[in-house]
Image (cartoon, rainbow, N blue to C red):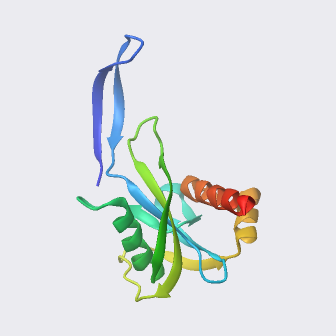
Amino acid sequence: MIDLSIESVVLPSGVSTELELIRHPGGAVALALNATGNICLIKQYRHAVGGWIWELPGGRIEPDEAPLLSAQRELREEVGVEAANWQPLINFWSTPGFCNEMLYLFSAKELTKVPLQRDADELMEVHWFSVSEALKMCDSGEITDAKTLLGLYKLARAVERQ
C-alpha cells in the first residue's frame, strides 16, 4: 500500500540532508449529496487515531485506477450508492511534509442505492446530514479529518455563490 524510504537529497538551498518519506498511490474522496441536499458522512473506526471519526467516503487508489473510478468504487462499497453526476472539486496533498499522497475530491449527485460491498476490516456507519448540520460539526471540532473539513469548506463556498 505504501513505500517507506529514507532519501538523500540536495535541497534548493544547496543543503544536503536525509528525509524520511512515505510514497503513497493517492486517494479519492466523494462528497455525496442526496436529492434532499443532505451530505453523506461516514463514522469510521480509525485505530491510528484511537477511535471513531467523521469522514467523507473515500479510499486508496488501486494500481492503474483513475481517481474518479476510485471515488465511484469507494462510494459504492462504503455507502451503497452510485452517482450519475460527478464533478471534480479539488486535488490536494494530504501531508506534504513527509508523504506524497495526493487526494482527489469529487462531488457526487443523482444517487441511487446499490448493495454495500465493504471490506471485513472496515468498521463504519453511514449518516446523512444537512449541510448546516455538517458545518456545525466542523465548527464544534466534532469533525477533525482534513479531507472532510476541506470538502465541507468547498461545499459551503459553492452554496455561498448560489
Q: Is residue 63 left or right of residue 59?
A: left
Q: Is residue 146 left or right of residue 9?
A: right
Which residue is at a point 64% across and 61% down the rendered structure image? 155
On the image, the x and y values in percent for residue 101 come to: 39, 47
Q: Is residue 38 left or right of residue 64?
A: right
Q: Count of labels shown?
A: 0
Q: Quadrant of the N terminus?
A: bottom left
On the image, the x and y values in percent for residue 118 come to: 38, 79
Which residue is at a point 74% across and 70% down the rendered structure image? 133
Residue lying farthest top? 14
Q: Quadrant of residue 145?
A: bottom right
Q: Quadrant of residue 21?
A: top left
User: In front here: 111 or 97?
Assistant: 111
Which residue is at a point 59% across and 80% down the rendered structure image? 34
Which residue is at a point 29% across and 41% down the rendered structure image? 4
On the image, the x and y values in percent for residue 41 come to: 58, 71
Q: Is residue 76 left or right of residue 66?
A: right
Seen in the picture, residue 65 relative to 78 is either above or below; the reply is above
Q: Quadrant of the C terminus?
A: bottom right
Residue lying farthest left? 64
User: In front here: 117 or 65?
Assistant: 65
On the image, the x and y values in percent for residue 103 come to: 44, 53
